[in-house]
Image: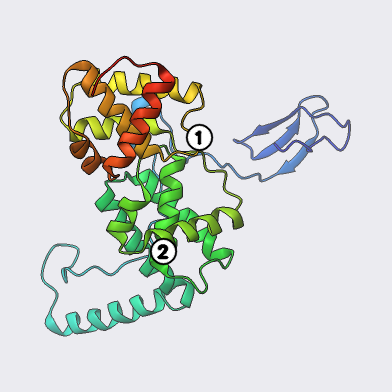
C-alpha cells in the first residue's frame, strides 16, 4: 500500500490486501477498494529459513565493470550443445558469424566503445594495484558518471581512468599514491593530478584528505618490521596530526619519517635509504620530516 491510498468511502488508511481473493479491502467499512491485485511475493511456499534460502532465486547482479553491466546474453566459445556433444562444423561456422555480429552490435555506439576500452584498462590497473572488487565497481560507476557529464572529451582514456581510481582509493582509505598509479598506467603523474582535480571539481566530489597513518602498515610490512614498530609509528603520527604538524606535507614523506623514527626507538633500525626506497620519496624528505617531528614532539632520540 502506498502512503496516499485511502478508502474512497470512509477515507480510512487501514487497507488490507487479501491475496487469496486478489482484493484490497478497507478494514473499517469493508469496502472492496480494488480487485485482481497483483501479488508481488514469490509463487512458492517455504516453511523454514533453510527452505526459503534454497528456493529464493534471482538474476545476476548488475556489474558496472562490464560495458553492458552484465545484462546481456553471450554466445560462448565452446561449440558444444547442452549435452556437451561437439557441434557439427557447418553449425560452428554459423555460430562464429552470429558471435561476431552479436559482438559488433553490443558495442555499436562511441560511448560503448569508450567503455569497453576504459573498463578493461581500469581492470588492468586495479589488478596491478591489488584493489578489491568493490573498489573496481565504484571506480567503474564514477567513470560512467564522467561519460554522462561529457568530461571525457579531449582527454586520454587512461588519464581519466587513473584519476578515477585515485579518487576512489582515497575515498575508501586505501593507500595508493599518484606515483604508483602513474607507474602502472603509463600516464604522467602531473596529467593524472590535473585530470583528478578537474573530475572532482566537475562532479563535486568530497574526497577526504589522505591519512598518513594508512601508509604505515604497508611500509612496515615491506621493511619486515614488527607490529610494535607499526603501533609506535601510528602513535607518533596521531600526535603530529593533533598538533597540526602534517598540514601542507606529503603524507608518504611524513609516514616514512614516522616509520624511520619508530624503527630506531624499538631497536629495529632501518637506514634512511631503505625507508626512502620503499616509500618512494627522497632521503632529504625523510630527514626534513624527521627533524620536524623530533623538534615539535620533543623526541629524545639520536639517529
Task: Name the spot of residue 14 as percent of width and height, x first.
Answer: 76, 27
User: Residue drawn 65% across and 33% down?
Assistant: 18
Circle 1 or circle 2, nearest the eye: 1
Is residue 68 visible in the rendered structure shown here? no
Image quarter (top left, top right, bottom left or bottom right) of the C terminus: top left
**Horizontal arrangement in the rendering, residue 218 relative to residue 16 (left or right):** left
Q: Nearer the viewer, residue 184 or 82?
A: 184
Q: Return the residue at label 1.
A: 247
Which is more toward the observer, 94 or 38?
94
Q: Pinpoint residue 28: horizontal percent, then vertical percent.
A: 81, 24
Judge by depth and name the residue closer to the eye, 207 or 16.
207
31 to the left or right of 230: right
Q: Check disc 1 and report its element: helix, strand or loop.
A: loop
> Dot 2 corresponds to which residue?
159
User: Residue 249: x, y in percent?
Assistant: 45, 38
Q: Quadrant of residue 228?
A: top left
Q: Earlier in the sequence, mark 1 or mark 2?
A: 2
Residue visible at 42% across and 60% down?
A: 190
Classify residue 288 as left or right of residue 28: left
Question: Is residue 83 shown left or right of residue 64?
Answer: left
Q: Which of 129 and 23 is in front in this view?
A: 129
| Residue 303 appears in the picture as rendered | yes
Gap between marks 1 and 2 measured at Cα: 28 Å
The N terminus sits in image quarter: top right
Position of 278 relative to 193 (above/below): above
Amino acid at each position: 500500500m502506498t502512503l496516499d491510498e485511502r478508502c474512497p468511502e470512509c477515507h480510512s488508511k487501514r487497507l488490507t490486501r487479501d491475496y487469496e481473493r486478489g482484493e484490497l479491502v478497507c478494514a473499517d467499512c469493508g469496502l472492496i477498494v480494488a480487485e485482481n491485485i497483483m501479488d508481488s511475493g514469490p509463487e512458492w511456499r517455504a516453511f523454514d529459513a533453510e527452505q526459503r534460502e534454497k528456493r529464493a532465486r534471482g538474476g545476476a547482479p548488475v556489474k558496472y565493470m562490464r560495458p553492458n553491466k552484465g545484462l546481456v546474453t553471450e554466445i560462448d566459445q565452446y561449440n558444444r550443445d547442452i549435452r556437451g556433444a561437439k557441434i557439427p562444423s557447418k553449425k560452428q561456422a554459423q555460430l562464429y558469424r552470429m558471435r561476431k555480429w552479436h559482438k559488433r552490435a553490443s558495442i555499436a555506439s562511441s560511448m560503448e566503445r569508450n567503455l569497453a576500452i576504459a573498463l578493461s584498462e581500469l581492470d588492468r590497473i586495479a589488478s596491478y594495484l591489488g584493489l578489491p572488487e568493490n573498489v573496481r565497481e565504484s571506480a567503474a560507476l564514477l567513470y560512467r558518471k564522467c561519460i554522462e557529464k561529457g568530461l571525457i572529451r579531449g582527454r586520454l582514456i587512461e588519464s581519466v581512468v587513473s584519476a578515477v581510481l585515485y579518487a576512489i582509493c582515497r575515498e575508501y582509505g586505501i593507500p595508493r599514491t599518484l606515483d604508483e598509479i602513474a607507474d602502472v598506467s603509463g600516464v604522467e603523474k602531473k596529467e593524472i593530478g590535473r585530470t583528478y582535480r578537474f573530475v572532482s571539481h566537475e562532479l563535486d566530489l568530497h574526497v577526504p584528505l589522505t591519512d598518513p597513518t594508512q601508509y604505515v602498515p604497508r611500509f612496515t610490512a615491506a621493511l619486515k618490521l614488527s607490529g610494535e614498530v607499526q603501533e609506535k609509528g601510528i602513535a607518533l603520527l596521531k600526535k603530529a596530526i593533533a598538533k597540526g604538524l602534517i598540514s601542507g606535507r606529503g603524507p608518504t614523506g611524513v609516514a616514512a619519517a614516522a616509520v624511520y623514527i619508530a624503527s630506531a626507538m624499538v631497536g629495529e633500525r632501518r637506514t634512511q635509504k631503505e625507508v626512502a626506497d620503499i616509500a618512494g620519496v627522497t632521503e632529504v624528505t625523510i630527514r626534513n620530516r624527521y627533524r620536524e617531528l623530533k623538534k615539535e614532539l620533543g623526541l629524545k632520540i639520536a639517529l
